[in-house]
Image (cartoon, helix red, strand yellow):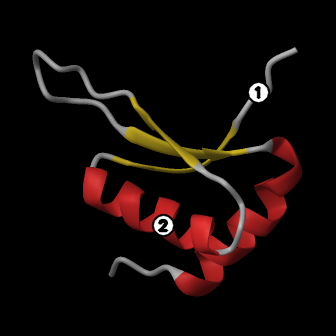
Amino acid sequence: MSKIWQKVFEDTSAHRAEIVRAILDREGLNPVIVDLKDSSYHFGKFEVRVDPMHVLEAIRVIKKDINFE
């Protein structure tokens, strides 16, 4: 049976999604990036997803360690 990955972050910037993925990976949460951008028209978003058992920890790390402002 395949896992259903849960979204913990989304943004239109590939760079921001990669930063979040790298930080979550450093924490051992094994995130993946899902590219939902339309290749023809260049709109859409990137999602960072984790295994359902890591969702709460991933959200905690994002809130504590990541600020793009």
Describe residue 43's horizontal placement relative to residue 27 as left or right. left
Q: Residues within 10 Å of mark 2 (few under 14, many from 20)?
A: some
Type of amino acid at the residue the image marks with label 1: Ile
User: Does the residue at mark 1 contact the one at mark 2 (Cβ under 8 Å)?
Assistant: no
Q: Residue at x 40, y 55 (%)?
A: 17
Describe residue 20's horizontal placement relative to residue 44 as left or right. right
Distance of label 1 from label 2 (alpha carbons): 20 Å
Say above or below: 45 vs 17.
above
Residue 22's disc is 2
Q: Earlier in the sequence, mark 1 or mark 2?
A: 1
Describe residue 38's horizontal placement relative to residue 17 as left or right. left
Type of amino acid at the residue the image marks with label 2: Ala
Q: Residue at x 37, y 27 (%)?
A: 36
Q: Secondary structure at mark 2?
A: helix
Q: Secondary structure at mark 1?
A: loop
Q: Residue 69, image x and y in percent?
A: 33, 81
Q: Residue at x 78, y 54 (%)?
A: 55
Q: Which residue is mark 1?
A: 4
